[in-house]
Amino acid sequence: MPRTEPIRAVRGVRDILPRDRSLWRAAERAAAEVATRFGYQEIVTPIIERVELIERVGEDTDAIAKELYRFEDRGGRQLALRPEATAGIVRAYFEGGLNQGPQPARLYLFGPMFRYDRPQKGRYRQFYQFDIEAIGSASPALDAEVIEIARGWLNESGIPELKLELNSIGDGVCRPAYLDRLRDYYRPLEEKLHPDCQRRLETNPLRLLDCKVPQCQPFKAGAPRITDHLCEPCSQAWTQVRRLVESAGIEYVHNPYLVRGLDYYTRTVFEFYPAGASGQQDALASGGRYDGLAETEGWPSTPGVGFAGGFDRVVEVMAASGVEVVAAPAAEVAVLADAGLDHEAANIARICRAVRSVAVDYEAKSLAAKMRSAAKLGARWVVLLSADEAARRTARLRDMASGEQVEVAWDELPERLSR
Ligand code: AMP
């Protein structure tokens, strides 16, 4: 039966069209260049993972359950579309034997992530991240290193003005006692908190600190700060990370309310925002240390640190800040032949491709219309071919900027086009 409506894209996802790809490509190129300069190597992990890998390590358990794309495959396996990259990269680090190689393994990844979130501007159900992970070292110098990579990437993508927020959330040694203090502080205020925070008070008190609901805001300022209650090793790491970040010339603000909700996150947490961002604006990149993650996945305890940056948001900020990337023409050379000469046109194109990008116009339309299409493509040259010329293996080469036109033998075209 014929359909009445054309088939459109799924809600919350979008196409990145060729006209937008040049900005994306600039952001991707900057990411790969900065990562490579710091000695990070590319890794690609699958988009599908076992659901346990994601659910065991998932962000806030509720949020992950709500946002996870999960499905059963034809073999009855419970699978998920990855909502983030770190869990998969840590899995690959062990399965691929990278834990046996030089430590830390310095890895980067580009790729789509999936979250069944409410679609809105800057928030998509399929979005793209740049992920950096340094796995196998607890050195605070690596925390500073990944921060420097994030800054370098954003700067080189054309976003010079950034705000870095930094905090430490301690570890399994000092955090439990701090959480008791935090509960003690909040318990007398319980009635005044909104219901989610009342629940968090017992289940996940750290998340009280990053609650955005207005009714809970007045109580934050008086809450104990974890950075005042770190154990000695965490305290030394916190001092060192800040010192190293400062000596890299990176300004930061200490945000004592910047936290992560799961036990496997340790010590450093950070987020980069565009400068001037206020209120609830989303981060361009966020990261931190996850020394407990490998164990949560069932592997030997192994420290790690990294960040995830969002290409979708970075490209939006690039566009809004007027970053312009000169888009390469779809083809530098357009071949326009008279009717019946498709074969010859294809041969000429093949010859010219030795030196230039070439598109042939095979449409049955007037020469004038073909010339207009060639101009739209951004072609610098047009090769015109008539039956006569084809018989002599020559063609007319036209320079689109000057309008100058010369007859050239096919074999001489590459030399002409390389000038
Ligand atoms: P997260 O993994 O939640 O820490 O996110 C890391 C980065 O990915 C964020 O700073 C955003 O730039 C980007 N990001 C996260 N969720 C989305 C989304 N739904 N749509 C677009 N970008 C996102």
Image (tube, rainbow, N blue to C red):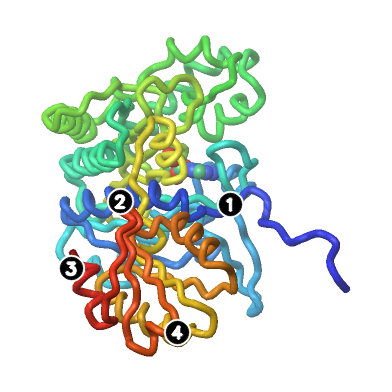
Residue pointed to by mark 4: 387
* Residues at discs 1 and 2 in contact (Cβ within 8 Å): no
Q: Position of residue 130 (x, y in %)?
A: 36, 50
Residue pointed to by mark 1: 14
Task: Classify residue 174 as left or right of residue 239.
Answer: right
Residue pointed to by mark 3: 101
Assign a secondary structure to mark 3: loop
Q: Position of residue 391 (x, y in %)?
A: 38, 89
* Residues at discs 1 and 3 in contact (Cβ within 8 Å): no
**Mark 2 residue type:** Ile
Mark 1 burial class by Cα count in 10 Å: few <14, some 14-19, many 20+: few
- In-front residue for pair 281/384: 384
| Position of 125 relative to 267 (above/below) | below
**Residue 143 visible within the image:** no
Tag shown at residue 132:
2
Q: Earlier in the sequence, mark 3 or mark 4?
A: 3
Q: Residue at x 28, y 68 (%)?
A: 406
| Position of 296 relative to 366 (above/below) | above
